[in-house]
Amino acid sequence: MKAMLVAAVILFPRAALGGTEVETPSALGMMDRKVFRACGLHKLSKKETGALNAWLSALTLGIARETVRATAAAAAQARQELTWDELSTVIGGVILAHDGQSLGVISRKRHTRTSIANSVGDYGSSVGRYSIFNSVGSYGSTVSALSPFNSITRTPPRILKGNRAVAYLTVNKSLSPRVHPAMLLAWVYVQRDTLAPLDRRLHPNRAGGDFPL
């Protein structure tokens, strides 16, 4: 119905009102003459018809604007997960948990202590206390509210660059902008030309269900 009203603005600039052709908004122009008469609109004076036209025009415009806004919002929501090619923008960023704990630096350097690419470090190993890859830890399980792998949490880690939050690190699609943690890990390892530790550190059930490793 919304689409019909919007389209009618263009298609029906005039309508036959009681045998007399007058300026009318599309909503009235969409009406069959029998329906028009059945509704008693042919009895309206020119002033009354004009008032109804004005109201219908405002209503149609409001519906059109809301439709455009809702469509744009839906498209933006779908777009708010960073793509593979955009992940380079978060290199050097710090992963910060909602409780204020640092969870390492997004880096391709596997020997740097704070790098999440360091598979034996505090922030990159599968057993590290502050590692998002510790599947039983507070920052890596699927049930912890602080974990990026919890699909319903409202308090996942954030990525900070220059002390400014640039994205959530989460599989929760209702939060944006966001970076998928499984895609981030894969990207980091592709950049350093080795995928060997990837399968050992990322539990297959924690990828969020929609990211193919």
Image (spheres, rainbow, N blue to C red):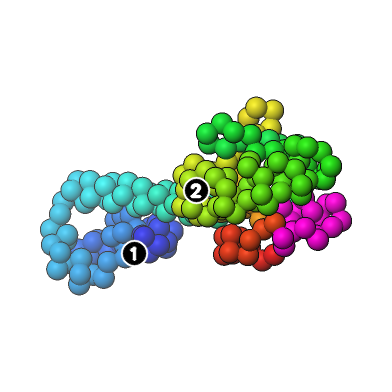
Depth check: give the residue in front, 28 or 96: 96
At x 23%, y 50%, the residue is 52
Is 7 situated above or below 134?
below
Residue assigned mark 1: 1
Say if residue 200 shows up in the picture: yes
Residue type at tag 1: Met
Of the pair 94 and 8, the residue shown nearer to us: 94
Question: Above or below — where is 156 with respect to 202?
Answer: above
What range of the chain is rendered magenta? 185-200
Q: Position of residue 14 (x, y in %)?
A: 34, 59
Q: Position of residue 161 (x, y in %)?
A: 69, 32
- As for residue 99 lying within the magenta part, the answer is no
Is residue 73 visible to us here? no
Determine the image quadrant of residue 107. top right
Count of labels shown? 2
Q: Quadrant of the N terminus?
A: bottom left
The residue drawn where x is 19% and y is 46% is: 47
Tell me, for residue 144, which label it has, or none.
2
- Pick the front one: 51 or 62: 62
